[in-house]
Amino acid sequence: MKALVIHCHPEAESFTAAVRDRVLDHLTRAGAEIRVMDLYAQGFDPVLSGPEWRGYLDAPANRSGVEDHVAALAWCDTLIFTYPTWWYGLPAMLKGWLDRVLLPEAAFLMPDAQNKDIRPGLTQITRIGVFTTCGASRWLTALVGAPGRRTLLRGVGYLCAPQRRSIFAAHYKMDSSTPRSRKRHLKRVDRAMTRLLAPLKKEKT
């Protein structure tokens, strides 16, 4: 198993970091090869510049400046995101990572004469895990449409293996969380990781 963990939070001592560490513990105990992209710690630039936008379709030159991230994405078979939900969606840093790294001919194939829609380019990824915190309640997040969850599990998920395994775990009402609620959520993370890392049907045990 080759696991890429995309971590996005500006505070090193955040609860999101504790969730990330719990995820990494499970991966380590499962014997996975692990790469972590800590976007804030690395000073990742989330802004898709004018030159980048104009060269967006020019593969492989479009990977300039994000080569390591694109290579890590191509390397992994397990993709995990740990981040806070802000305004019901992804932090700008993480959205910018998607904009700049999930590129044509790397993450997906553009339409052509035979294909009228984009096609998946990350079909080696068979597992996706999404771990987040939400200030709003579960029902309010659902009412708004949970755009962050949709973007990662449906949007990014579409680019991955058709029979991928996907898991999602969120601590809702994070602004009024307590030590007890956070402890309870870490147990939820444990259960989610156990499901995510269980053998797939075609994997050798």
Image: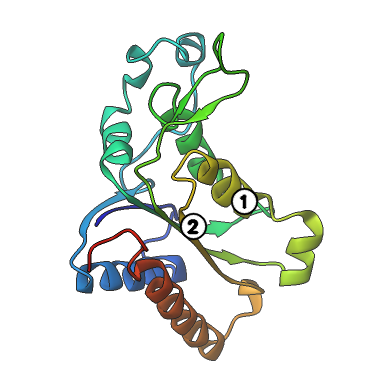
* Residue that carries the numbered disc 2 in the rendered image: 83
Residue at horizontal 32%, vertical 19%? Answer: 64
Q: Residue 154's spot in the image, x, y percent?
A: 60, 47
Drawn side of residue 8 relative to residue 175, left or right: left
The residue type indicated by label 1 comes to Gly
Drawn side of residue 24 relative to residue 131, left or right: left
* Residue that carries the numbered disc 1 in the rendered image: 148
Disc 2 element = strand
Tell me the crowding category of disc 2: few under 14, some 14 to 19, or many 20 or more residues within 10 angstroms, Cα based.
many
Closest to the observer, 106 or 6: 106
Q: Judge whether residue 202 can be spotted in this image.
A: yes
Closest to the observer, 11 or 173: 173
Please identify, in this view, whether the residue under mark 1 or under mark 2 is nearer the observer. Answer: 1
Relative height, residue 203 to residue 198 (above, below): above
> Which quadrant: the C terminus?
bottom left
Residue at horizontal 29%, vertical 67%? Answer: 24
Image-quadrant location for residue 143? bottom right
Q: Residue 92's spot in the image, x, y percent?
A: 55, 41
Please report contact status of discs 1 and 2: CB closer than 8 Å, yes or no.
yes
The residue type indicated by label 2 comes to Tyr
